[in-house]
Amino acid sequence: MAHFPKPAEGSWTEHYPGLGTGPVSYKDSYDPDYWQQEIDAIFKKEWLCVGRVERLGRAGSYFTREFPWAKRSILVVKDREGTVRAFYNVCRHRGNKLVWDDFPNEETSGVCRQLTCKYHGWRYDLDGSLVFIQQESEFFDVDKDSLGLVPVACDVWEGFIFVNLDPEPQQTLAEALAPLADGLAGYPFGEMTQTYEVRSEIDSNWKLFIDAFVEFYHAPVLHQRQATAEESQKLASIGFEGLHYELFSPHSMVSSWGGMSPPKDPSMVKPIENLLRSGLFGPWDKPAAVNDNQDLPPLLNPSKHRAWGIDSFVLWPNFMILFWETGWYLTYTYWPLGPSKHLFETTLNFVPPENASQRASQEFAFSTFKEYAFQDANTLEATQTMIESEVVDTFMLNDQEILCRHHHAAVREQVKAGGRPASYPWMPGSENGGGG
Amino acid sequence: MSDTTAAPLPADFADLDPFADWALDTWRERYEKRLDSTMDEMQAFYDAMMPRLSEALEYCDSFDLHDLPDEARNLLLLTFSLCEASFPVEAWRQPRVPDSGSADLEMVREPPL
Ligand code: FES
Ligand SMILES: [Fe+2]
């Protein structure tokens, strides 16, 4: 009893022959050797999003990112020409961490004219070149030109800063993000600078939280009590069906309906939602920046359905952007910290409010999102420990969980290939081999 | 009813003075106050705030958001705390999200007010 049409093959999953429909092993989500292979074949090879350009307001603005999974610390800086650059955060003299405050393992940010090492005062320009050595004449055969900070590949797409730990990345950032790089370009990200950012260390494999955010099959059940009694009964009896699923392997997306912002009938939502005109889908009143910009990027709302509410894109391997019909966006980033542990980061991004009412609507959208995120996160530890018990070795994935099946399969293909594979066996035009 | 310790509210909203201790600057403080409150306390706060919410926002809207007088700012912060308190009252019947065990969120960055 599909409410929304599925592909001619009868299901979203079978639209991609080769993806399979059988039960799936989750050994990839706790095995320590496999985790290390993921780090080597995926995280040390791919472009990884580390934040927005708005964090770097002017020349000399910088922030650091800790990558304990690679035993690396990254320094991201805006140089005098306005170029965003990334370096390993290590001093060329005797290896002190160049930029840190109070606790060397914590991330920091700030603005500086030059980068000065706390230990013996070596100084680097914003382009990474070494410009000052304390008591230089005491050294033997120094060639300052060869002692700049070690660069990390860095590029920017639509204001999102990406780094790649591969000294010679297999692909440019645009190639790696294709076809999303073009298909999502032009969205007014740069106007949505009112940002809430939260993070949490979670006792599960990084892929399990992606699983939780690429299917909404769980929503009517796990989040049942967030809706009014009548609504939640209705939702539970109908269940969830996506409007559209699409694979751009290794990337993917799910398009989903909305319709509660504003609701047809005020009794469908909680009292405070009516007063603040806001809820899980965000403030009900669209900001001008989005109203004026009705030409959404081509990949958004692919089914062109009038009930469209939200599109969730997985930007391979660990970054998601959610576009809400109401005119704001959300990001998720998942950093592996071990086979059974990851750091989850999320940002909510709105057009800056013009008045107190808009500010309160956004605050309530954040508050609501966070209630859901708590529920989503809570199940993960419970899942992680039980798949690790190996009492059951394969699990059932339905058609609405195609993106879970796909993400694990894309990880498998890349681990097998030792880097981004040339093709994926389930994608049209592909023979039967994924190894590249 | 003037209280020198709690945050001052606009005179027209003196009925909310007993709840002025909910005027807290950061999300973290508001969330922790929610966790540390009883359901009765939150119900009383909710019952007092909800009928005044639209008027409170209207009042705050009459000022430049980036240049709010202290009293208006405190009032707006009360509405933010109401956001937090609404979930226990309207959905959970307990201060915490059910089954949230040891889960916690760290606020890395939030919009200043
Ligand atoms: S380690 Fe940096 S100046 Fe010595
Ligand atoms: Fe969820």
Image (cartoon, coloured by chain):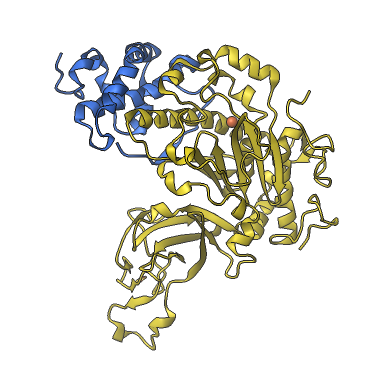
Chain colours: A yellow, B blue
**Count of numbered badges drawn on the protein:** 0
Ligand 1 sits in which quadrant? bottom left
Q: Quadrant of the N terminus of chain B?
A: top left
Q: Quadrant of the C terminus of chain B?
A: top left
Report which quarter residue B17 is drawn in: top left
Report which quarter residue A204 is drawn in: top right
At horizontal 51% and vertical 28% (from top left) the residue drawn is: A280
Q: Is residue B30 left or right of residue A24?
A: left
Report which quarter residue A141 is drawn in: bottom left
User: Residue placed farthest to the bottom in the image?
Assistant: A141
Relative to A193, say whether B97 is above or below: above
On the image, the x and y values in percent for residue A35 come to 65, 51
Relative to A37, say whether A9 is above or below: above
On the image, the x and y values in percent for residue A279 come to 48, 26
On the image, the x and y values in percent for residue A308 come to 61, 32
**Which is nearer the eye, A11 or A221?**
A11
Relative to A295, say whether A10 is above or below: above
On the image, the x and y values in percent for residue B42 come to 37, 15
**Which is nearer the eye, A412 or B75?**
B75
At horizontal 74% and vertical 54% (from top left) the residue drawn is: A413
Relative to A57, say whether A239 is above or below: above
At horizontal 61% and vertical 42% (from top left) the residue drawn is: A300
Q: Is residue B37 left or right of residue A230?
A: left
In this rendering, does residue A111 appear at all? yes
**Which is nearer the eye, A279 or A5?**
A5
In this rendering, does residue A45 appear at all? no
Q: Is residue A329 left or right of residue B14?
A: right
